[in-house]
Image (cartoon, helix red, strand yellow):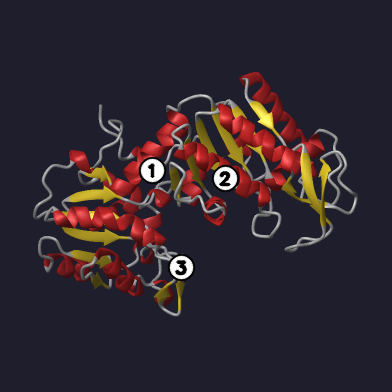
Amino acid sequence: MSAFRTLDDAGSLQGKRVLMRVDLNVPMENGRVTDATRIERVAPTIREVAGKGAKVVLLAHFGRPKGKRDPKDTLEPVVPALSKALGQPVSFAADCVGDEAAKAVAALKDGDVLLLENTRYHAGEEKNDAAFADALAANGDVYVNEAFSAAHRAHASTEGLAHRLPAYAGREMQAELEALTKGLEAPQRPVIALVGGAKVSSKIDLLENLVAKVDMLVIGGGMANTFLHAEGKAVGKSLCEKDLADTAKRIRAAAEKAGCRIILPVDAVSASEFKANAAHETVPVDAVPETGMILDAGPKSVAEINAAIDTARTLVWNGPLGAFELTPFDAATVAAAKHAAARTEAGQLVSVAGGGDTVAALNHAGVGQTFTYVSTAGGAFLEWLEGKALPGVEALRAKV
C-alpha cells in the first residue's frame, strides 16, 4: 500500500482537527435510518481517530439538493444511528462552512466527534470550487478520505481538500484500495471476471477493459443474450440489445486477440412471463422458444462457470447471472456465488466483488461475508473496473 498515504503515515493526531469525508448517504424512512451498513463500515476508523485524541469533524453528502438547502436532505436525522454505531455522542452543526461550523469545531474536546451539515447544500461542493474547498479546509489540520463510494467525483470534499491539508486514506478506503489492487492491478493469475446484469450498453467500457486484463470472462444475465444473438442464436422474447450485435462481436474479437476466454451460457432457464415461480423449462441456448424469455443460466452453464473458477486464483465479480430477485431464477447466481465462496474459504481464491446489484445478489446467496472483499461503492467500483482514474483516489497517492 506504499502507493497511497494511509493513517499509518499520519503521525500523532492528538489534539488535531481531522476532517474526515465519509459516506452517510443511507436509506431513510420517516426520519430514521433503515440500513446502517455504510455507517457501520466507517465507524471503526472514526473510533480509531477519536481514540488517538483527535477532534473528528465528519463531512458527508446526502441526496441531491443541487447546491441549495433542502430540509429533506439534512444529515441531522443520521446523528442517532451514528452515535449508536460509535458508542459515543455525536454533535451536529447546521452548516459545513462559515461561523456555525467554526463555532462547533472550536467547541470540540480531544476525542469528540462532530457531524457537519450536507456538503451539497453548497454549489461549490460539486463544482470543486477553490473558495469552498478553502472554507472547508479552514476547520481542519488533517484530511482523511473514508468515502471510496464518492471517490469517482472530483468534488471539494473528496478531491479539493486533499490538496489543501495533509491527506490520508481511512481504513475502509485502504481496504478497498488493497482489494482492488489484488483484483486487477497486481492479481494472482489466472484471473476470472464474472459480469452480469441487464444491458451491454451500460457496461461496454467495463467489458473492453476486462478482456485486456483477465484470462477468463463470464458474461451472464440479460447481457449474455446480446452476445448469443450476435452469434446467430434466437433468444425469443428475452431482454436483448440487438442493435449492439456488432459491439458484442468487437468485444469477442478483442478478447480473442488478448487471449481472454469468454464464457457464455450453454443452456438457459426459459419462462413465458417475468414473475416469481413462473412456469419454466431448461433448454439449450439454441433452442429457446419463440415466446420464451431467458431468465437464468442453466445447470450446464453453472457447471462450466464453476469449473473455470476452479482454475482461477483471482475472481472479480460484478452483477448477477439471472433474474436473482425472482425464484427460481436465482439458482445460477446462488450456485456460482456459493462455489466461489467455498474456494475463497479454502484459501484457493481471492474474490473481489461490487457494483450495482452485486452486493444484494451475494447477500441473497448468503456469501456476502465470505468473499475476500465486497465493495458497497457502486459507481466508483464500476469506474475502477473500467480502468478509469478516480480523482479522490489519485489525490491520495504518495508523492515519489
Quadrant containing the C terminus in the rendered view: top left
- Front residue of 66/306: it is 306
Circle 1 crowding by C-alpha within 10 Å: few under 14, some 14–19, many from 20: many
- Front residue of 130/104: it is 104
Which residue occupies 52% across, 55% down?
A: 363
- The residue indicated by pointer 1 is 176
**Measured Cα–Cα span from mark 2 to mark 1:** 20 Å
Q: Secondary structure at mark 1?
A: helix
**Measured Cα–Cα span from mark 3 to mark 1:** 22 Å
Which residue occupies 13% across, 49% down?
A: 13
Q: Earlier in the sequence, mark 3 or mark 1?
A: 3
Query: At label 2, which amino acid type do we have?
Result: Ala
Q: Position of residue 317 (x, y in %)?
A: 55, 41
Circle 3 crowding by C-alpha within 10 Å: few under 14, some 14–19, many from 20: some
Reply above or below: 271 against 316.
below
Numbered tag placed on residue 337 in the rendering: 2
